[in-house]
Image (spheres, helix red, strand yellow):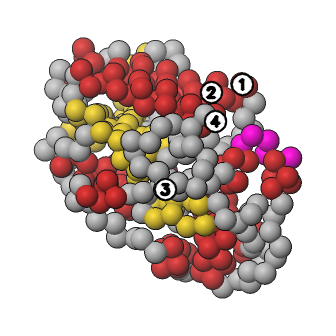
Amino acid sequence: MKTVLIAGGSGLIGKKLNQVLSKRGYKVYTLTRKAKHRGQIYWNPAQQTIEGKHLDKVNIIINLTGENIGEKRWTNERKKALRDSRVKTTQFLHSLVSNLPNLEYYIAASGINCYEQDNEIHVESDVYGTDFLSKLVKEWEAVSDLFESNCKVAKLRISMVLSKRGGALDKMLLPVKLGLGSPIGTGTQMMPWIHIDDLCNLFVYAIENELAGTYNAMANCDSNHDFMKALAKALKRPFFMPKVPAFLLKLMLGEMSALVLDSTNASNEKVKNAGFVFQHEAIESTLSALLKR
């Protein structure tokens, strides 16, 4: 069975993906700045240092690195950290290819918030937008393409990941639990999402079917109103509060408010046409299952 190296393996997706791959028989190593356990390899991409052991065994790299987009306000310093943790880290990974003689495949995590802000349903071949996130994704994907001279490359534009163990959903729960669930902004903005199990299975599917190119990693796209209403229903809480004004979020979050106010409508037909089947496509049943006690 193949050997997989996960960069950014200590996060929500990385931990789950490690479990999924290991159960399927893959040998999995993770890159971490705190290597304490078996299967972990020390690295510090900011200092461009890495422990060399096991790299010659690696057949597949999955790059999930990147500071959390929604953790802090997007000051100039924070924007630099978001960029460096994606672009410079990927550049460092690529600089190691001479130490990876058996590398066959590279999968890059990317972001679905990369399209023009309009009413179109976007496909992977559409042009990038002009806002901060779009420019970040464009540069991130460009450095991922450096691997094409060494191996096959796939880029998964990941949407909001739904999990019962943290992530974006966790941040939405408290106000809804308190009975304060409501649409955000206009409520009409589209929100693409994917269940974490489907996302991990998509990574596996990409490996085992040698997918190449860019794919929108999303199961469905719902309006903010419909998503928040489904969340309130899953928690058995009321949904009658007035909309949260956009100006208030902009005041609180600054430019980062784009994460919840901007609309991203995209298509997943390309990945479906490649043969992948989503297990969770309806938002009501997906949230009900995730939040079931």
Q: How far apart are marks 3 and 2 (CA)?
A: 30 Å
Comes first in the chain, label 1 or label 4 = 1
The kind of secondary structure element at disc 2 is helix
Identify residue for label 3. 121
Q: Which amino acid does label 1 sit on?
A: Glu
Q: Residues within 10 Å of mark 1 (few under 14, many from 20)?
A: few
Viewer-proximal residue among 141 and 16: 141
**Mark 3 touching mark 1, by CB under 8 A?**
no
Find residue 283 and report its horizontal and vertical position in percent: 51, 73
Identify residue for label 1. 77
**Mark 3 touching mark 2, by CB under 8 A?**
no
Q: Residue at x 25, y 58 (%)?
A: 273
The reply to whether residue 272 is in sight is yes
The kind of secondary structure element at disc 3 is loop
Identify residue for label 2. 81
Q: How far apart are marks 1 and 4 (CA)?
A: 17 Å
Which quadrant would residue 136 be assigned to in this image?
top right
Q: Residues within 10 Å of mark 4 (few under 14, many from 20)?
A: some
The kind of secondary structure element at disc 4 is loop
Comes first in the chain, label 3 or label 1 = 1
**Mark 1 touching mark 2, by CB under 8 A?**
yes
Find residue 15 and report its horizontal and vertical position in percent: 42, 49
**Mark 3 touching mark 4, by CB under 8 A?**
no
Q: Which amino acid does label 3 sit on?
A: Ile
| Stretch in magenta | 251-256
Q: Is residue 193 in the magenta section?
A: no
Q: What residue type is labelled 4?
A: Asp
Q: Distance between the residues labelled 4 and 2?
A: 17 Å
Identify residue for label 4. 131
Viewer-proximal residue among 170 and 86: 86
Q: Is residue 254 in the magenta section?
A: yes
